Structure formats: C-alpha cells, structure tokens
C-alpha cells in the first residue's frame, strides 16, 4: 500500500510499477514545490492551506475535490496493456523533468495533469481486462 496516497495498486506488474513511479514523482513535486512534508496527501494539503497565499488555495481546493476520484481510479485492477504503460511512461518523462520545481507553474501543471489524466487513461485501457 502506498501510505502517502492512501491506495493499493494491483494488476499487471509493469503497469503497477509505472503508475507507482508516477505517483512517487507527483509526491516529490508536492514536497519540492512547497517545501513541506507530511505522512499523507490529505495532511499535506491541510498543512499547505495554513501557509499558502490565497491564489494557491484554488489549486489546493482542486486537489481536495479531485482526490476521491483519483483514489477510486487508483484502486482499479490495472490491465496489461502496452498503450497504458506507454501513456504512464510519457507522464513520468514529462513530470520527472519538473521534479526540481525550478518552474513552479510547470510543476503545478504536472500535478493537475496527473489528477486529470490518470482516471482518463485507466478508463481508456481498463477494457483490456475483458479481452
């Protein structure tokens, strides 16, 4: 179980490994972007609410609103699908380049993209379970 995200990934080993790496990158983006660490993403967001300027609170509100949906998708059994793995690896490549948070807006965009794309790509490829 990934304690920080509060989910357990299951399914195809390669898909789980890739998605786990993407989740680790996004955790690092959160920590590096705000220089705050916490045991869970919920705790992280709560800590940040107290520290960030008003305009940042919109971003945190988005994260809070999208988190239940993201977690629901992360609980799906991941199928073996080369296209799914490739999609995740592409996101790893893009997000991994921002891990130093030299450009905070780009790092924030990567986090938003993670919250939007993971449900989309899992939806797109979970039909592979029925093949």
Image (tube, grey):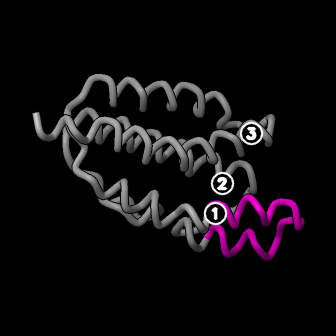
Q: Which residue is mark 3?
A: 101
- Inter-mark Cα distance, 3 to 1: 15 Å
User: SS for tag 2?
Assistant: helix
Q: Mark 3 packing: few (<14 Cα in 10 Å), some, or many (20+)?
A: some
Q: Mark 2 packing: few (<14 Cα in 10 Å), some, or many (20+)?
A: some
> Is 24 placed left or right of 79 in the picture?
right
Image quarter where the C terminus lies is top left
> Is 35 placed left or right of 69 in the picture?
right
- Inter-mark Cα distance, 3 to 2: 10 Å
Is 49 located above or below residue 5 in the figure?
Answer: below
Image quarter where the N terminus lies is bottom left
- x, y percent for residue 27: 56, 51
- x, y percent for residue 35: 74, 56
Q: Mark 1 packing: few (<14 Cα in 10 Å), some, or many (20+)?
A: some
Does the magenta-highlighted stretch encompass residue 47?
Answer: yes
Q: Which residue is mark 1?
A: 37
> Is 50 placed left or right of 26 in the picture?
right
Does the magenta-highlighted stretch encompass residue 94?
Answer: no
- Residue 5, by quadrant, is bottom left
- x, y percent for residue 108: 71, 45
Mark 3 vs mark 1: give the one in front.
3
User: SS for tag 3?
Assistant: loop
Residue at 74 percent of width and 36 percent of height: 106
- x, y percent for residue 66: 55, 61
Q: Which residue is mark 2?
A: 31
- Inter-mark Cα distance, 2 to 1: 6 Å
Residue at 64 percent of width and 27 percent of height: 97
Mark 2 or mark 1: whose residue is earlier in sequence:
2
Magenta span: 44-63
Residue at 36 percent of width and 35 percent of height: 18
């Amino acid at each position: 179980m990934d304690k920080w995200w509060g989910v357990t990934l299951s399914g195809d080993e390669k898909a789980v490994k890739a998605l786990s790496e993407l989740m680790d990158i996004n955790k690092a983006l959160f920590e590096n972007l705000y220089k705050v660490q916490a045991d869970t993403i919920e705790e992280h967001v709560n800590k940040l609410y107290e520290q960030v300027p008003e305009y940042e609170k919109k971003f945190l509100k988005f994260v809070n609103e999208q988190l239940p949906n993201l977690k629901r998708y992360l609980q799906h059994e991941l199928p073996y699908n080369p296209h799914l793995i490739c999609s995740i690896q592409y996101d790893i490549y893009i997000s991994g380049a921002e891990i130093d948070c030299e450009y905070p807006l780009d790092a924030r965009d990567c986090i938003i993209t993670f919250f939007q794309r993971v449900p989309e790509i899992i939806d797109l490829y979970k039909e592979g379970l029925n093949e």
